[in-house]
Each structure stands twice: as C-alpha cells, then as structure tokens.
Amino acid sequence: MTIKTPRATRLAKHLLIAAALGGLSYTSLSAQVSSLRTGRLPNGLTYYISRDAGASEGTAHFFLLQNVGAILEDDHQNGLAHYLEHMAFEATEHFPGGVMNFLRARGLYSFDARTGTDDTRYSIMDVPTAEKGLTDSVLLILKDWCSGISITEKDTEKQRGIIIEEWRQRGGIDKRLSDSIAGVIYNGSQYSQRNVIGSLDVLKTFKYPDIQAFYKTWYRPDLQCVIIVGDIDPAAYEKQVQQLFASLPAPRNAKARPAFSIDDNVGPLYYRFIDKENRSHSYGLYQRVATPTNRSTEEATKDYLLGQLFNTLAPQHFARLRNRGAEAFIAASVSYSPLVRGYAQFAWDFVPYAGQDEEALQQVLFARTKMSVEGFGKEDFEAEKQKLYEGMKEVLSDDKGLGTPQNFIDIYRNNYLYGTPMREFRQQLEDNLETLVELEAEDMQSWLGERLGSTRNLAFVAYTDSPTASAISEETFRDELAVNKSTVLDLDASDSKPITKLIDFKLPVGKIVREKKIPSLGATEWTLSNGMKILYKHLPKELKGEVLFLASAKGGQSIVKPQDLASFSAMQSLIMASGLYKYDRNQLAQWLRSRPMEVNLSITEYIDGMQARSKTDGVDDLFSYLYLVLNKQRFDQRIFDKWLQRKRYIYASQPQQGREAVDREIRELLNPITEANPREDQSFYDKMKLSDLPRLYAEHFGDASQMAGCLVGDISEAEAKRIVTTYLAALPGNPKAPRRTYTIRDHSSRERVIERTFEVDTEGDLGEVELSFIGDKKLSERERLALGLLEPLLQNRLFDELREKEQGTYSIAVKTNYTDDPVASASLSIHFITSRAKADHLKARTYEILRSIAAGGIDRDEYKKVHIPQVLDEEAEEKASGDEMGLGVWIALLNSYAETGKAPNLSKKGTPLESVKISAVTAQDLSALLKKLLDEGKRRDIVVKSIAPEAKTWEH
C-alpha cells in the first residue's frame, strides 16, 4: 500500500541518491552515528532516533519495522501478513475513524506499508514538525500499529474486497510464472509456499479471528522497531518514545520467531513451465548462493561490491557475441541479486533463435564456466571498477544527498535485523571506497569460482506456451551441463585490434562565419560555415568539470515517406549496431572503456536530436566520437540479417489469442492501420532493405545546416570555439538549403467516441477499464496548471469512491498530459482493474464523478489537500533557487532561443517571469477545464473482461 502526492517530490530527489547506494548501507558499519538516540525498552521494543535537518527541512519521518513477514504464516494464514498491513490503516484503538482517514484529513499523503517475505515496514513521511500535536498523533499511530489495530469484522470484510482486487491485479502471467517455478528456485522450502499476496482461497474464506490470531502471535515488542528521522530534537523524541511505548505489554510464553533456511540441492533441479499466455519460448538457469546475515563486515562489503561489478561485466560477454553476429539467442541476460533473507541468486535467462535451443544453452553454459574459471580480463575489471569508484566519489561530493532519511533507515534496519554495526554514512562510503580500491581481478575470479564452480543449488526452467512445444529436456540439460561443449570462440582472445587513433584521416576545414552576443542569456551564437548554429554558454558551476552538447532539427518520423517506413524502422534500431567507420562494436567498446562519455541520438515523431556529454578533459575524444557517429555510420549485412531474423521470430511467436491478441486489436482500433501507420508484420519486414539505411540515416543526421544546438559547461569560450570549428564545422552541411520542417501526422482514429467491450479467454475473473479524454485546443497557462492539479484531485476522489466505499478495485491510475509542440493536445486517462461483474458499475460511477467535478462539485477541503502542497512546493523551489536557475532551466532557455530566435523574458534576478502561479489557480478552473475535455474532446471507453466462467477453455 502506497499513498503519495506531489509534495513527496522534494524528498524523492534525495531518495534517488539513496537508491543508487542502497546496497552499500548493507555493508560494514562500526561507530555510533552522531545525534543518534537508540535503545531497547524493557518490553523488548527497539528504537532509533536521529536528526536529519539537511534533507528533511522542517519535517520528520516515522517508521515501524516488524521482524515479521509472510514466511511466518501457517498454511491457513497464507496472505494474512499482507492483509494485516491493510487492516493497520483501518480503525485502531485511538483512531476509530481509521488511520488512513486521519492522515489524509490532515494533508498527510506520504504514507506507505510494505509486507515482505521476511519483514514488514510501515512509514509516515513528511510530517511537519512545527505542528507538535500532529507529530504526537503520528507517534500514537505507531503505537496502535504495535498492539492496537482493532481488526473488526466490518473492517475485515471491507478490506477483503480490496485485497482480492489487488490479488486480481497481480494475478497475470508473471504471477503464475513466479509461483510455478518457486519450488525449484527455493528447493521446496517454506519460501516456495509464501508469495506475500497469498492464496485466493484463504483470502476469500478466512474469518477475522484468524487474522486476530496472527496479529496477537507476531506483532509484539520484541519483534518491533521504531525509527524516527528528521528535523527534530532526538532527546525530546526519545523521551516521548520511552514514555509511550514502554506501556506495551511484553509477551508471555511467546512463540519463538523461527529462522528459515533453504536446503541445498546437490544436483540441478528441472522445471517445465507451460502457459498459453507465455510470451516467449525461453529458458532460465538459476543458482542460489548463501549470504549469511552474520557475515563479517569485510565479507559483506566485498560481496556487494563484487556483485555490482559482476552485473556490469558479465553482460559484456553476450554483447561481444552479438556484435560479432555469432549469438544463438535473440536475447540473453545475466545478473546477481538478493533473493530472500540470507540468500542471493545468479540468473541467466535467454531466448533462443528458432531451432537453436541447444546452441544457445551451450553458449550460456560456456560463459558460466569461463567466468567461474577465469573471471574477467584485468583491463575490463579495472575499467568497471573505475566507473564504480567515480560514481561513489560523486555521491560523496554531495553533502546534502548523504543524509537522506532512506540512508539512515537502511543503516538502522540492518543494525536491528542483522546486528550490522553503525557509523556515519560518509565514513561508511569512504571505507567502502577503500575496499573497492583494493579489489583486484583475482578477487573476482576467486569470488566467482567459489559460487559458480559447482552445480550445487542449480535450477533450470524451460518456459513454453504448450505441452507440445519443443523444449530442452531435463536429460539434455544434464548432458550439456556435464559435457559443457561449445562452438563459441574465446572472445577475450579475439582478433579485433585496439584503436590507436580514432580519427586517422584529415577532417574537412570549417569555420565560424558569424558571431552574435545574446546579453540577456549571457550566451553567444555561432553560425558555422556548414550552416549549423551553436549557442555557447559558460556554466562551470552547473557542470563542474563537464561539458554538454545538445542539438536538434525538425523532421523526425513525420518526414519519412510511407514506402520508406519499414526500412526507417530498421535504421532506427540499427544505429551503432555495426560500429563506426572501420571499427566494429567490440573495438569501439574497448576504446570507450577508459573514456567516460555519453552520446545518444533520438528520432521522435517530429524531432531529430542528439546529446553528448563527457568530462572537460575528454572533450576531444567526445567530439571525435560524435563526428564518426554522425558522419561514418555503418550498416553491415550480417548484423542486419541477424536483427531481421530476431524481429521475424518475435512476431511469429506472438500469441494469436488471449490477452495479448486483444491488446493488439485495441491498438489498431484506436490507431487504425493505414499506409502511413502500417501493421508491423512479416510483409512489413519484407520491405526492409539494407541499401536504404545509409540514405535514411543521412536524411536525418547528414546535413548539419538543419541542426541548431547548444554547447555548455565547464569549458572556456576559446576552447569551445576550437572544438566547434574542428569537429562540428567539419560535418557536411548545405548552408543554402531551406530549413526542414515537419509534417503533422495523427494516426489516431478520427472517431470522436469509441466505446467497446472486449472479452478474452484468460485465467481468473477480470474487468479492466481504460477511459481517455483527448482535447486538441491550446490551453492557457492557467489551464495547464489546472490540468496538473486535476490529476491528484481526481486520483483522491476515485480512490475514496471506487476503492474505499465500493471496495471494487485495489488501485486507480489517473494521468494528465499536455503538449503544444507541434500541435496542442491535452489528455486525461483513467485506468483500473476490477472483476468482470463490477466493471460496468464502476465505470458508470467514474462518469458520475467526472460530471460532478465538471459541474463544480469540488469540496473546499478536498481542493486544499491537493492545492496547498503544490503551492508549498512552488514557494520552496523559488526560495531554493534564489538568483540561480540551474542547468535544466538554462537548457530550456537556450533551446527556446534556438527554436524561436527570441530571448526569453527574464526578471531582474535573471529568472524566467511567470504570468500565472499555482497559488492563483482555483477549484473553478479545474471544473471548467474538465468540462472542456468532456464536452469538446475525443472520448475513448475501453473495457476488457474475462469471458464467462462457463465459456472458459483455459489450460496452462
């Protein structure tokens, strides 16, 4: 269960950094975190309280961690741990009206609860600390969750409908697959019997005393941990926690919390998964590895770091195969990741070409054996280690990002659950950096040898769509595993020669023919001899030690002739696939390995664009590479043939019935097949010609005169001029050519109203509703802001009505969007999943709600709940930005000038002037905008239902 509003975006910026380092906080910790108050009450409850003013800024975040998860359920309780999480937001001892209702009524929407296999976490985020009564209430909620959840028959029955809808929403092919293979992944252990969401039979039939019993048995102080992080006085909050939670009764004759393990399987296990909705004929090879929670600090740190390096190095083996056109698979992936408490897993998944199942298996087994024996080459290992090192150093340079609530929570969680020592997050990262620096390629080889050197704990799964489909048998797999034969060349001993000089020819001479200063932007515009226009701006603070280049031209897919669409599709997919100039992909990968840079091309409906970024000291390498990308693109026959073979195979493998077939029918209903919007089928692939690809590429990126760009960053004007004249002015371009424009295309149906119900033969009881309203009128700035507010307001209203009152669905997705370039388009879409029987009723209720809001039926408090947080965000952003605009704003301003030739209107501070602010938008604006969409726009009303039970022919 997760409830969030736009106010969470401020914290989300910090959480992005925490997520990037999440695994690191599992590693070694040794000294007390400053400001931390921690202890264990006589009844067994543990608490951690610390100050984090930097990231929290006037707010606090409250968490309750339960060392209780689905793994503790008995068979007749399968799913009740997760069910209990839902009950926690209903009535409790001190909140009889419901915890969720209390929080939402006070503008708190960033609350969450997640039940896992081994533990459960509750959180209430972004609680204003200035409102002491509110923080007191939140603490009381945490206490009620510990022992005061009411669990009445009424609330249990209310949640039953919601949770069954959640089960239905999750109950597709992916759930059937994971449930089916769990037996071999977890070797028949308790983990194979618990999937958190539980058994539908149990969810339908259990009685509320059953969940009361689970609550009484497992929700108790010795298995509970309170964590509070934020802009607080830890000593004061510690006193509150001690006084409030000490009254929780210690359990008498408590049932011991068991630890669960998975027995080794000495030989490999085999499983054949059969499901008619299975999307691809594929295989998976999985190996379970023990990662004891009581490992030493050093061992845990090394395991995490080596795992991260493995996840970047191992896929390169398959990439080299594909670059040579030697692969027997359409797709192959490999990863190392946590599985459940105390275990991790290596996963090798692959989709073979038709008739090449055994060859693909041989290639995977060869890669596995090679890595277990040899590890990875020293140069490859050092290059990936350097990238990881630089990423960690970058995080260390951001003082604000280091102290996020999530970082603290991870530290405290691991200390509570596993006894991992605690220390300052900065010190933790610095020590991890030291460990990383000391790692050698030989350490990786040893690590892999220990884990992949035997067939212990292996499982092999064949994924097919019918019992008659051909598949590798258990006997064949065991034979291949034993023999481990392969026709693959040793790619580390390849004959690809390293690149000594990327551009070994003389570049054409170009120059700047016109220079213009733009005082309001502090920028300079250069017109080059080939017709290209470049805006330069010095941004050393926003891009410290880096340079960024962006350029675009009008055109995109809109300028492609219908007869070229097939070859154009191939061209888009095969950019860079064959390499550049005289270099193949493997040579380029080797050259790029020690040169951190990013070069991307994009072709959208109306725009051809590019982006290039690197360290300032690598700017010549960056623009040398970009020159080849734009002017020396390769399209080789062998790579083209392999790619086309993959496309044909994937198309031929598409299910011709079931849900996927219905989805294709819906797409073609909404976007009819025409000459300009062809169906991608075998006849489409027949029209693809390799000889067309160079011409089509040149039409989009071959004439520099069509491009306008900006060069910004930590680079002087003199150096920028040198780069521009040396590389960009050398590109071919016709300055006399007229500026290209785009052709407006709209492939959507011209029908104003499309209302259809589809029936599909699929497992379970399904009713899926998708409503869309699309307007083609340009919106004013006030209307655009109103559209952004309409999304959370409608989300809240539908949540209250369809979920809480009707108990008809688990979640509702509301999405609004607006664009006015090249044509205006405003849209509102609503999506939810329910049962077959409830679909029409809930859809009708949705229309009633929309008409009510459009008629002005927006409650004042309802509007304040979505309006005030966005006003506060707007004010906070203005305060935080001050006189500085940031990289994103500068790019937008420069891009606007490049497109229009007009300097933007800026305030005295240098920031863009806004004519309308969110604070000025009213509830009436939202109603008027919604009425416009309902009355004037296109309407799409699509319902998908499972067929009636008596008509089902399901087999799997």
Image (tube, rainbow, N blue to C red):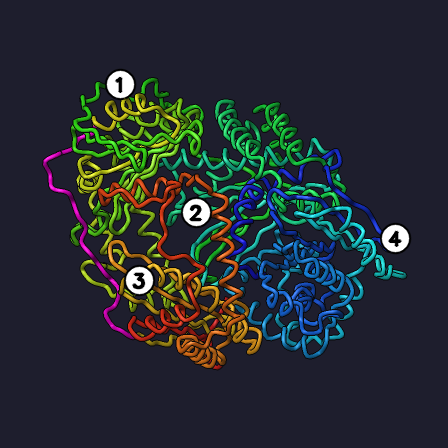
Q: Which residue is mark 3?
A: 779
Residue 420 vs residue 900: left or right?
right
Q: Quadrant of the N terminus?
A: bottom right
Q: Amino acid at mark 3?
A: Leu
Instruction: Please provide percent x and percent y for residue 419.
Output: 76, 42
Which sits earlier in the primary sequence, circle 4 or circle 3? 4
Gap between marks 2 and 1, in whole Å?
43 Å
**Residue 884, picture quadrant:** top left
Element at label 4: loop
Which sits earlier in the primary sequence, circle 3 or circle 1? 1
Q: Which mark is residue 544?
A: none
Gap between marks 3 and 2, in whole Å?
55 Å
Residue 519 vs residue 768: left or right?
left
Which sits earlier in the primary sequence, circle 2 or circle 1? 2
Mark 2 vs mark 1: in front: 1
Element at label 1: loop
Q: Which residue is mark 2?
A: 357
The relative height of residue 44 versus residue 511 in the rendered view (above or below) is below
| Callout 3–callout 2 Cβ contact below 8 Å | no
Is residue 574 shown to the viewer in this render?
Answer: no
Gap between marks 4 and 1, in whole Å?
75 Å
Residue 855 vs residue 12: left or right?
left
Mark 2 Cα shell of 10 Å, populated few (<14), some (14-19), many (≥20): many
Which sits earlier in the primary sequence, circle 3 or circle 2? 2
Residue range corresponding to the magenta coloring: 731-753
Q: Which residue is mark 1?
A: 504
